[in-house]
Structure formats: structure tokens, C-alpha cells
Image: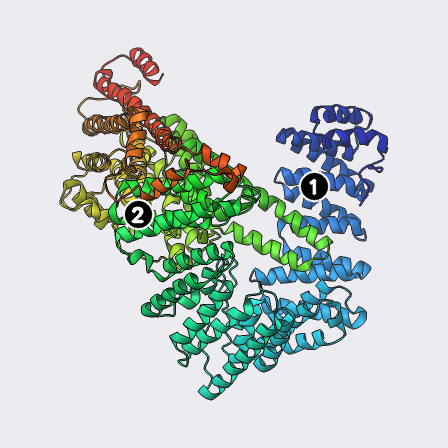
Amino acid sequence: MTSKFGLAGGIPERRVRPIWDAIDSRQFKNALKHSTSLLAKCPNSPYALALKSLILERMGKSDEALSVCLNAKELLYKNDSLLMDDLTLSTLQIVFQRLDRLDLATGCYEYACSKFPSNLELMMGLFNCYVREYLFVKQQQTAIKMYKLVGEERFLLWAVCSIQLQVFCGNGGEKLAMLAEGLLKKHVASHSLHEPEALMVYISILEQQEKYGDALEILSGQLGSLLMIEVDKLRIQGRLLARSGDYATSANIYQKILELCPDDWECFLHYLGCLLEDGSSWSKGTNNDPINPPKPEDCKVSQLADEVFHSRISTSLAFVKKLQVDTSNDFIRCPYLATLEIERRKRLHGKGNDDDIVEALMLYFLKFGHLASFSSDVEAFLQVLTSDKKTEFLAKLIKTLDSSATAPTKVLGKSITIFKIQELAGNMYKLPVLELEGCAVQMVEMYCKSLPLSKDLDPQESMHGEELLSMVCNVLVQLFWRTRHLGYFIEAIMVLEFGLTIRRYIWQYKILLLHLYKSLDVKNILMETVSHHILPQMLVSPLWGDLNNLLKDYLRFMDDHFRESADLTFLAYRHRNYSKVIEFVQFKERLQRSNQYLVARVETPILQLKQKADNIEEEEVVLENLNGGVHFVELSNEIGSKTLTFNEDFQSRPWWTPTTEKNYLLGPFEGVSYCPKENLTKEREENVRGVIEKKSLLPRMIYLSIHSASASLKESVEENGSISGSKISSEFKFLLERHAKMLGFSLSDAVEVVMGVSSGVKSFEAFGSDEIDWINFAVFLNAWNLNSHEPLQPNGDQHGRGIWYVVDTLLVKYISEKIKSMESLICSPRVDLPILVQLVTEPLAWHGLVIQSCVRSSLPSGKKKKKGGPVDQHSSLVFNDIRDSIQSLCDIVKEVAKWIRGQIDRPENESVEIILSSLRKKEQDEGPGRVFHVLESLIPSINEAELGDRISQELKTWSPLDVARKIVTGDSALLSQFLNICESKIKYFASALGAASDLEFLRYLSTTERVEWIVQALH
């Protein structure tokens, strides 16, 4: 490619250099000044125009930049000689890419290549354009042309990778793979291969066609010498042999690998799988999900005869024993963990017993019990033991610990391991409340005693025993769930805040606190995997500013990655790292199908609709920008056929909320003792798909509600190209039927449920966990009914008071119920608050928009109407319902505001005292406060020489009073935002009530008087 400061379009370097220097230093005004000066001297230079467009785009002037770019493009097309300048084209490509007009950049390169078909630089630029647009077929065609032009191996590999990408996208896999193989075979015959990556691509093409013998032959031949690392070559051989069914030879290969790399656990599983011929590792249905990888316990049971099975198990045991003898490194765990896996396989085959597994577990504990990884290492093996054997194993562990005399850090590590095993085995949570409290006290005392071991560590290094406080938190939350005593909940928060005071870098504490009471900042690099800790709670909170920032940042982060991922792909092509080409494209495809990405895309406009719901004109602007919600209805139609990906790291979630949809603390105590974080993707996918589908209908149903209400009170609604009343009604009914179907009912049955709950015949439990969706349905049902000529029920009242009254009753009853169910937020966790927030900001807000539309449409026009007509009578009936509805909604929102003020106005010191008093009960030995007392008693007894200066100083800063104030301040900030939302709605309802009261009088005013009144009312 032409040098940046070389001649471009005949412009000398000295004139271009100041412009690039200014751009690189972000002095865009200075760069524009130099660019204008350059254009004055070279007005017909496409490169000068391209530079100006680049500067304008960086300054945020997108429209001007596009206009200048198009001028440069026209000049290029007029002078073929200028098309040879790749620097001009690449500069235009940068601008077009940033303006999301990749098609224009591609068009420039296509035109240039058509004029100069033998120019390699232009063809590479065109290939780059196709990479950015993910046009794999055109990538392949362009790469083949370059290969034919210069015969370079890299261009052939570019073509083959483009073919592979087509295969992975599901387009003609078998024929395309054969084409790629043919291209490579022909090239090898004439030129051989010269790069390891080229060999890997060749082998992967053969693997896709299940030609394992051919792949092994190539690997064993001269081309195999391209792989310089012997272990890498052996791994490929082992995989190919296993997939071809030659398990014996494959097992021998994996045995060689283990001799070279004795700590390769995955390799051992492959070795054992081949030895026992279970084939689970190499079946076509193998789970390649990087987020939820396959577990060793998911392996198939070997179908070998008993004698053969016994012989091969003996062979594997002998080999493992040899590995243990040959391994002198105390940190290599695989040979010892392998014994456990062998015993587990024996038990699965019906030839082992629990005693052998317990013995193997004990041996593993004696050697590695002090490691933090011990519990996760043995979790799968613990699950196959009976309850009695787990108890026996625990007893042996405790006895071993009592008799051991090792280094303090190892004793501490083994003690922590025993607590973890108690959790995994479920024994801990079967204890009575008093004994469970005793466990928590024991853990926190152990933590305090272990602090001197960390006095010389750097603040960013993990401290010895810091896992103990996470475990204490788990126990205290379990006690809260059992007893519903708030003190345990507060105590869990205090324990974690205490740990963060000593070392603020412990992410595990922050995650637990996030699920108890506070928010968390997430770095961009972790947004897709960690945002599930924040987003679901924020979506139902009144913190709209924070939610807007979170959604905006997340979507910007994702969209920037999608825009820039092609750069990484082309970089991988240029550096001949072909495996990364496939990886980058597949990663981008996975992110685009992320369920969180779809949720964020749908929730962003819904948040905008919530924020503008008190002003119908502003709401209509949002809906207009959303094209009336049509796009989201299309998304709802497509969601059933989309394959969603779940990239969340649920392993970091606390036990009481294993997924975003489940929170044990919200329900009664179920006696759950151990909650394994299993792969719940299949169950979650159906649920998330349903949520997205329902949410996607909201913008359109809000749009139709406004127009339906308006149509019901106007003689003609075909204004400004709007859809007719009959079309509104038919589309609205169709969406209501879909909504009802998502709730599990037909439209008529759903109407019956709503009517039954409203009248008290059925309880709110009939709505299940979808109460917000049900009340939304009732709101939209009312809006449709206003403009519909179909009765809601047989012999039902079509336009009477019924449906308005139903919606008002549902909202008033349910909101009142939630207010009564909540005590002070200081005295109980905020269980019902998110539901109350949703009720006010969703169904009540949408119902308010229907009211606003009706009020606006009820304002009489200048055209005089006859009194007493059917339209006027209908308007009067609806008008009465509107007035009653406004009054009831205004009253209930005032009740919510009154409750919020009662929470906010409580003196801070009183709230703080309520929190602290739940922990200070000195007259009894049991109950909340025992763990807290241990922490409090540590502060006066600080020994700086023993703990070190840093830990001692940090401990002195810990204040339970400050933690309590943080809790109170956080609740107050949350409620203040909710109060602002409620007050905005009260203000609107009050003004709407006044307007409604004047409507009847307004009908008899003159046209001039009406105009004056309307102007005053709107402002």
C-alpha cells in the first residue's frame, strides 16, 4: 500500500504531513484549516477531499462528511488514473465505514478493480471490503483471482477460509468442503505447503468431511514436519484416531502426551475414554459451548464386557500409579485426580464401590486438601456418594485435620476445604439454627485468626482465608431464608463490607453485595458475561438515569465490537493466522445472537416510552422514531426461529439466585441445602424467548392504544395518512390474541380471567408470576374495546363502564395490596418494591396514555355538531369513565407517594438505629449478632505488630455505623427517584382531571373561546 505521506493524487508529502499530524493529535479544527488550504490549491484532488471528509467525520459532522466523500467518489470515477491510488480509496473506506456506508466503499473498490483487474493492491482492498461486509462468497472469488494472479499460498488459504466460513453458515457444506480440499490438494501437489497454519486448515477441511485416514496420512508425511511442537502434533493424531474409531492406537497416543505433560486433565479424560471405548468425547453431538463446556460426569457408560473392562481399568490404574511415581512436582494434580475418575467409572459400570471412592478422596485430600481448588476438583465425585458415605468422608476429614501438624497456611486451607465440603454435601444446612450460627461464628473467628498470615502480602494479592467471609455470608443468608429475621440479612452485609474494608479488590464480595443491596461497576471487557448481575434488577428499578446509561453503554460496546470485529478478521488474514479468522467470525455471530443483546435492544425503547409516558406528544415522537413499533413486531415474529446464545457466567452467582429468573429468597423456605449451578440453558431459552416476544409487542400496542382511543371519539381518523379505525381494531385484536396466547390462554379465556380477578371471583394468584403482563393485557384490552364493535364476552356490555372499571380496579387493588404488604424497607428486604415500580411505570402509565388520548380527542373542534346523536352519547359515556378513571388512578398514585414519603422522611439516625439494633442482642446466645460481635470485638484488640501496618490501619477505618448509613442512603436515593416518577404522574392526573371537568362546559363555547382554552390547557 502507498505510504501515508507519499504522493497521493499528485499531492506532495510536505502538504499532506501537517494534516495527518493534526488528525493524529486530535486537533481537528487545525486539520480542517490545513485541509481547506490544500483544497484551494488542489480543488479536483479526490485525496484532498477524502482527507477533508475524514476530518469532518471526526468532528461529528456526518452529513457533511458523506457529501464530501460522494464528491471525491465522483471525481475518482471521472478519472481512471486516480483509481490506481489505493491511499485515496483506503481513506474513503475509513470514512464510509465510520458512517455505516460500507456498500459505498465496496462500490469504489469494485469499480477500481473492474478498470484495473491486475492490480493486486486494489484487489486486496476489495477483499478487505468483503470481509467487513461478511460476504464470504465474494471473498472466495476475489481471493481465487489473487491466487491465480500471483500464485501465492496465502491467497489460496484466504479462499479456503472463505469457503469454510460459508460451510459454518450452513450453505452447501459438503460440496464446498470438497472444493476447498481440491484446491489445497492441487496446490500441495505443485507447491507443497510452507506454514503450520496452512496445514491446520487442510486437516480441518478433511475432518469436516470425516476423512480421518487422509488427515492422518498427511500428518504422518512430510507436511507433518511443519508442526514443530511434538505435543501439538500428538494431540491432533489422538483426536483423528479416536474419531476414526481406532481407540487402541489413540489411547497409546494420549498416553505419550500424558508422559510429556502429566498435568493435562483433558488429555487424561480422552485417554480413559479411548481405553474404555465410550466415544463420548468424539461424538458428533459433543457440546462445544465455551460458556457451558461438557462435564466429565456427563460421559457415557462403557459397553465393554466385564473382563475387558476390568483389564483396561487395571491398565489405566497401573499407568496412573507410574505417573504419580514419576511426578515429583507437588502442584501437579492430574495423576492423583485420575485415580478418582477411574474409581468413578468403575462405579458407573457397576464394578466399584463407595469405600474405594472415599479412600481415593482421602488420599487426594492429604496431598491437595489445602488448595482452594480442592472442592471444585472433587465435586463431581462427591455427587455419586450416598448421604451416609458423605458424612463418613467428612468425619474422616475432620479427624485427619486434628492429627495433622503442617504449616499454618496449609492448616487454614484444609479447614476451609472441610467447610466447603460440608456445603457441597449438604450437611451444613441440615443443622439446626443454633448449630448453623455456630458454624458461621467458627468461620469468622478462623478468618480473624488468619489475618496475621497476610500481613506481608501486597494489597492486590489474595489474602489467606478470604473465602471464609463469602461462606459466612452464604450461611447467614440461609439463616435469613429460614427464619425471616432481618438481622441475619444485615449481618451478611456487614461481614462482606468488613472484608472489603481490609481489601477492596475482592470481586466475590462485591458480587454477593450486589445481590443483597448495592450496585456494581462492570468493565467493558466483561459486559456480556457479567452484566446479568445488574441488568435484570435495573430493568425493574426507578433508577432510569442509571438504567439508560447501562443500556446505552452496553449497546455501544456491542455495536462497536460488531463494527470493529472485521478489522480483527482482516488482520488475522494478513498475519496468516487462519484459525483466528474462523474464531473471530464465529464469536461475532455468537454475540449477535446473545439473548442479553436482544433484551437490551428491546428494553431501550421501552425505557424511552416509560420516561415520556406523562406527555402524549413526547410519547408520539418516540413512537414515530420507532416507526410505530412495527420493527419490534417483526422481531417478535422472528424470535421463534432465532437460536439464542447465553454467554452469562452463572458460576459467579450466589446460591440463592442461580439464574436471573430464580431467587429463593422471594419465596418460602424450601429446605434447599445445596443448589448446584447446572446448565439451565434449555429451560432459560424458552423463558427468555417468551419475554422478548412479549416485550417486542409493547411499542406497537402502545401506538395502537393511543390511536384506538383517539378513533373512538372522532368521526374520522384518516388524518395525515394514519391508518383507519377498522384497521386499527383488526391489527389490535390480532396482537391481543398473540399476547393472550403467550399467557397460555385464548383471547376469550384471558378476558374471563381478567374479569374474574377484577370482580374478586378469582384471586391475583390466577395471574401467576406474570401479573404485570396480565394487567398490561387488561389495559390494552380496554384501549381496543373503545374502538371495537365486538362484545368482549357473550351478552357483555360493549362500551359500558365494565372494562374501564376492570382496569381501574385491577390497578387500584393490586397497588394497594403491594403497599400493605411492604413494611419499612429498613425492616425487610425490598421484595415487592420492584413489582410496585413496574405497576406504576408500565400498566398504569400505558393506561394514562389511553386517558390522555381520550382527553385530547374529547376537545371539541370548531365544527358544530348536532346534540344528542349516537356519537355524542357514546362520547359522554366514555367521558364519564375517563373522569372516574383519572380520579381513582390519581388517588392510588398519591397513596404510593404517601408511603414513599413515609420511608424517606424517617430520620436517618432512627433508620440506622433500627439496622444496628437488629444485631445487638446481648441477653441471648442465639439469633443475629453473634458473627457481628466477633468482628466488633476484633477492633479493640488490634495488634499492629502481628497484623502489619496496612491491615491494622484498614481495620481501624471499619465502621458499622457507616455501613448502616450506606444502606439507608441507598434506599433513600432509590425511593426519591420513585417519588419523582409518582409526583410527575400525580401532576398530570390532577391537570387531566381539571381538563375533564371543563370538557362538558367547553362544548358550548364559541370557536374563539375554545381555542383560547385549549392553548391554556396544553401549556
* Residue 24 appears left or right of 840: right
Q: Residues within 10 Å of mark 1 (few under 14, many from 20)?
A: many
Q: How many marks?
A: 2
* Residue 223 appears left or right of 766: right
Q: Residue at x 68, y 43 (%)?
A: 105
SS at mark 1 in the image: helix
Three-letter amino acid code at the position of disc 1? Gln
Q: Give how far across and how far down residue 131 sits, in percent.
A: 66, 51
- 417 above or below 983? below
Q: Give how far across and how far down residue 960 sits, in percent.
A: 38, 34
Q: Name the quarter where the C terminus is drawn.
A: top left
Q: Give how far across and how far down residue 956 sits, in percent.
A: 46, 33
Which residue carries the number 1 mark?
Answer: 93
> What's the distance in space between the residues labelled 2 and 1, CA to CA?
54 Å
Three-letter amino acid code at the position of disc 2? Leu
Point out the frontmost of discs 2 and 1: 2
SS at mark 2 in the image: helix
Which residue carries the number 2 mark?
Answer: 665
- 481 above or below 177? above
Q: Earlier in the sequence, mark 2 or mark 1?
A: 1
Would you say residue 819 is visible in this rendering? Answer: yes
Q: Residue at x 32, y 38 (%)?
A: 834
Between 690 and 997, the one lying in front of the other is 690
- 413 above or below 873? below
Q: Residues within 10 Å of mark 2 (few under 14, many from 20)?
A: some
Q: Quadrant of residue 65?
A: top right
